[in-house]
């Protein structure tokens, strides 16, 4: 039997990770947040051949989809959302007129797997702490991300971050809208929202929220697009509880918008 070479194991991990990160220093698309909307967008864009990396603070992808509603681990989608679950080969069961349920763990793990297998470079346990700004012809735009290790963030250690450049950022950090909040707080820039800033999320109104999620999925500042709950929180729309069709459709829409902007690669 071969003796396990601990040194080789360490070297393999270090070399592979550094190779992966180095290859992601210049991206087409950087996705912040591995919830349903971010993963869906990454899956679609990587599947079209764009160079995509996804940065997720936690160890696991999935965001708020694992626990269904109140830890009862089923999600609900309407007909439009079911189309995407069908495409992902996630089994669904009809429930009532126009509704479908899916096992939350199956939906989460399948979407994560499809995003990875399509070519998304996933960096879990890395947190995005800032953006890169550039100015061209008097117009500022987001041109990349500033990332740090989550344990560094959690412990508050004074360790400087690393930087990746990209052509498009997807803000998919959910209710917290973290990346946009940092952009506005540090730079005082005006967003493409009616109030010019982050309007903030309103209370439960699922029907309106589901429709608004798609409407609010857009480029909110040059170089940065909002998707999922972050889109509704940015534009002052409502929450919708554990119905996930809007999140998936928003991920699809942001992928289409960005592909249209970036064009052939
Ligand atoms: C790296 C980060 C950072 C950071 C956050 O919350 P999510 O699941 O996001 P969405 O928008 O795809 O889905 C929202 C949905 O889960 C939900 O909460 C719904 C439908 N709520 C309705 C209601 O009424 O409550 O995922 C966001 C992900 C998480 O995994 C975070 O850990 C991650 O983003 N994240 N990753 N750097 N700075 N901030």
Image (cartoon, helix red, strand yellow):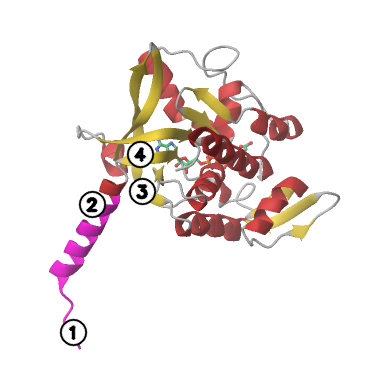
Task: Say what secondary structure mark 2 lies in.
Answer: helix
Front position in the image: 152 or 190: 190
The residue at which mark 2 appears reads as 18
When the figure is inspected, residue 221 is found, relative to residue 44, above or below; the finding is above
Across and down, in percent, residue 172 comes to 50, 36
Q: Is residue 12 magenta?
A: yes
**Which secondary structure lies at badge 1?**
loop
Residue with the mark numbered 3: 123
Identify the residue at the far front of this view: 264
Q: Secondary structure at mark 4?
A: strand
Callout 4 touching callout 1 (CB < 8 Å): no
Q: Secondary structure at mark 3?
A: strand
Q: Quadrant of the C terminus?
A: top left
In this picture, residue 190 sits left or right of residue 158? right
Look at the magenta stretch and give its main secondary structure.
Answer: helix
Can residue 243 be seen here? The reply is no
**Sequence-earlier tag: 2 or 4:** 2
Measuring from the top left, give residue 67's x and y in whole percent.
58, 51
Residue named by callout 4: 127
Query: Nearer the N terminus, badge 3 or badge 2?
Result: 2
In space, the residues marked 3 and 4 are separated at their CA atoms by 9 Å
Tell me if residue 133 comes above or below residue 25 in the rendering: above
User: Mark 2: few, some, or many residues within 10 Å (few <14, many ≥20)?
Assistant: few
């Amino acid at each position: 039997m071969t003796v396990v070479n601990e040194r080789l194991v360490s070297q393999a991990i270090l070399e592979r990770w550094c190779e992966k990160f180095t290859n992601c220093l210049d991206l087409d698309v950087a996705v912040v947040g591995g919830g349903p909307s971010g993963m869906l967008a990454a899956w679609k864009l990587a599947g079209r051949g764009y160079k995509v990396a996804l940065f997720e603070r936690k160890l696991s992808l999935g965001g708020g989809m694992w626990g269904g509603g109140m830890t009862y681990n089923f999600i609900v989608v309407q007909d439009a959302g079911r189309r995407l679950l069908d495409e992902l080969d996630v089994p669904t069961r009809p429930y009532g007129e126009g509704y479908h349920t899916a096992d939350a763990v199956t939906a989460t793990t399948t979407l994560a797997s499809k995003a990875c297998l399509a070519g998304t470079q996933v960096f879990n346990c890395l947190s995005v702490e800032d953006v890169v700004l550039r100015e061209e012809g008097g117009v500022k735009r987001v041109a990349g991300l500033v990332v740090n290790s989550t344990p560094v963030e959690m412990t508050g250690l004074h360790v400087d971050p690393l930087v990746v450049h990209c052509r498009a950022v997807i803000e998919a950090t959910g209710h917290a809208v973290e990346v946009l909040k940092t952009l506005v707080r540090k730079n005082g820039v005006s967003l493409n929202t009616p109030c010019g800033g982050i309007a903030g999320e309103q209370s439960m109104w699922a029907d309106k929220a589901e429709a608004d999620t798609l409407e609010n999925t857009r480029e909110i500042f040059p170089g940065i697009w909002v998707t999922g709950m972050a889109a509704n929180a940015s534009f002052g729309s409502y929450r919708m509880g554990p119905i996930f069709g809007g999140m998936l459709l928003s991920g699809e829409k942001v992928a289409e918008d960005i592909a249209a902007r970036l064009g052939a690669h």
